[in-house]
Image: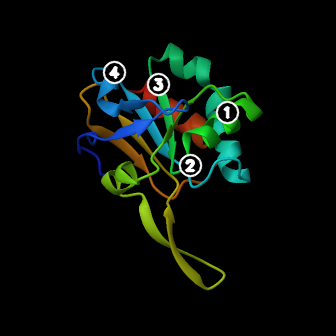
Amino acid sequence: MLEVGDAIPAVTLKDMEGVDFALDHYSGKPLVVYFYPKADTPGCTNEAKDFTALADEYAAAGVPVIGISKDKPAKLKKFSEKYGLSVILASDEPGDACAAFGTWVEKSMYGRTYMGIERATFLFGADGTVQRVWPKVKVKGHAAEVLEAARAL
């Protein structure tokens, strides 16, 4: 997993319309990138809603928020519309960003082992390096904690 001081990976994602964009588009300003396992599941929905509820405050701090999963762009668009989400949702269907950030990990549930996305958040400074990492995120209160760290940059 990326650590403090690491540079933002040069990866290309797809937005909800299926259009390619690169994370380096945001260079020169702070950036929050969070990974979540699957759109429209309880934890992922609550996390996206929490970031959305604080969207104006993130905007006032000049910090864009991008949520990344391996869901298809069409599913992300439906997810965003269903809950009125205002965070940027990006598709990493091939898993390049998950691999580069180190969030594609072996998981275990009910004795079954499988590969999946570890819920994690990364705060990048304007210089494009990791300022803070939250691995194995617990959703409740997380978006507010990240906002406070972003404001402190």
Q: Earlier in the sequence, mark 4 or mark 3?
A: 4
Give residue 4's position: percent from left, percent from top.
28, 46
Report the disc number at residue 64: 3
Q: Earlier in the sequence, mark 1 or mark 4?
A: 4
Residue indicated by mark 4: 29
Q: Gap in Å between the C-alphas at discs 1 and 4?
A: 24 Å
Q: Amino acid at mark 2?
A: Asp
Look at the numbered disc 4 and give the secondary structure of its residue: loop
Give residue 41's position: percent from left, percent from top.
71, 52
Whether 123 is drawn above or below 35: the answer is above
Q: Nearer the viewer, residue 21 or 144?
A: 21
Give residue 3's position: percent from left, percent from top.
29, 51
Look at the numbered disc 1 and give the secondary structure of its residue: helix
**Is label 4 in contact with label 3 (beta carbons under 8 Å)?**
yes
Q: Amino acid at mark 4?
A: Lys
Q: Amino acid at mark 1?
A: Ser
Q: Name the front one of labels 1 and 3.
A: 1
Q: Nearer the viewer, residue 51 or 101?
A: 101
Q: Earlier in the sequence, mark 2 or mark 4?
A: 4
How crowded pointer 1 is (Cα within 10 Å; few <14, some 14-19, many 20+) is rated as many
**Is label 2 in contact with label 4 (beta carbons under 8 Å)?**
no
Q: Is residue 112 visible?
A: yes
How crowded pointer 2 is (Cα within 10 Å; few <14, some 14-19, many 20+) is rated as some
Report the disc number at residue 80: 1
Residue indicated by mark 2: 71
Look at the numbered disc 2 and give the secondary structure of its residue: loop
Location of the N terminus by quadrant is bottom left
How crowded pointer 3 is (Cα within 10 Å; few <14, some 14-19, many 20+) is rated as some
Q: Gap in Å between the C-alphas at discs 4 and 3?
A: 9 Å
Q: Name the front one of labels 2 and 3.
A: 2
